[in-house]
Image (cartoon, rainbow, N blue to C red):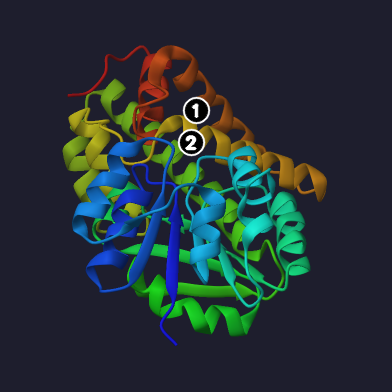
Amino acid sequence: MPENVGFIGLGVMGRPMAGHLVSRGHAVTVYNRSRGPVDALVDAGATAAAGIADLARRTTIVITMLPDTPDVEAVLGGPGGVVAAISPGSIVIDMSSISPVATRRLASMVAEKGAVMLDAPVSGGEIGAIGASLSIMVGGDAGAFARVKPLLECMGSPQRIVHVGIEPGSGQVCKVANQIAIGGALAGVSEAFALARKVGVDVTRVREALLGGFASSRVLEVHGERMIKGNYAPGFRARLYEKDLRLANELAAAHDVPIPSTRVVAQLVGALVDNGGAELDYSAVATVVFERAGLPPQG
């Protein structure tokens, strides 16, 4: 049976993700608080829902892509939300990055209605969403994952779609681990560049040399170039990364895992946000490191 897909949350990431589903011929019903993205997708072939419950009643698979835990809780479990209207046998896929604890609670609410919830946070930012090359980390029932995998492959690279575990929240735990690993690399590249600049060595040549050795990484390749050019146009906004690092520290504290490096990165990102950089790309954390080293911004 063909699926009727609902998509809630048409922001920087959600709009192109939903657009890929439409362009691949899926029947997609969309909802967003602001009307502009809805109208654009309707023009491309989607259908507009009158509200969240209306969308849930019309569809067999509901995808959410929202900023934070309270947003997902309100859309799924709030009055007139998805859970109140969803049909048995349906699947909810939350592709937001939220608390694993909240995810488990929401999955239980969905299960009580005879439906299944998968958590499927993504990595790759706006560029990955536009290019349908996202990495997708999925937690939840294996059968539900198999059913929705063709949809996920419209939004992400097939080789980067990983079923992390059957327990609800497994995907969110993986996303937290992803953000921890990126944070260490961001801080390391920022500090390496700050040191080279302070000593008077060309950071462009330093980056070129490091890309040829064990220090090579996607962070050095992509965000290192941003740091050199001073180009911090948002691909993934610093305020959202600050939220992800808060989730990382909360999860680590709950399970008694020390993550001292991540705490330092969280402080740097917090300083960036406090200094007015909330809407900049999260790689702009380098500007905080440069400033503390007494260096002007690059670019």
User: Residue 88's spot in the image, x, y percent?
Assistant: 66, 74
* Residue at 29% across, 60% down: 46
The answer to whether 21 appears left or right of 178 in the picture is: left
Where's residue 267, x and y in %? Answer: 57, 25
Q: CA distance from mark 1 to mark 2?
A: 10 Å
First in residue order: circle 1 vs circle 2:
2
Pick whichever, 242 or 80, lies toward us. 80
Mark 2 sits on what residue?
240
- The quadrant where residue 103 appears: bottom right
Q: Please give the residue where the numbered disc 1 appears in the rendered image.
A: 269
44 on left or right of 154: left
Which quadrant: the C terminus? top left
Residue 101 x/y as whole percent:
75, 52
Q: Height in image: 15 above or below 187?
A: below
- Under tag 1, what secondary structure? helix
Residue nearest the viewer, comparing 27 with 232: 27
| Corner quadrant of residue 187 | top left
| Picture residue at 56% right of the left edge, 47% below the top | 180
Pointers 1 and 2 in contact (C-beta within 8 Å)? no
Instruction: Please say if 177 is above or below 146.
Output: above
Assign the N terminus to one quadrant of the image: bottom left
Q: Where is residue 66 shown, x and y percent of the image?
A: 50, 45
User: Of residues 35 and 96, which is closer to you in this image?
Assistant: 35
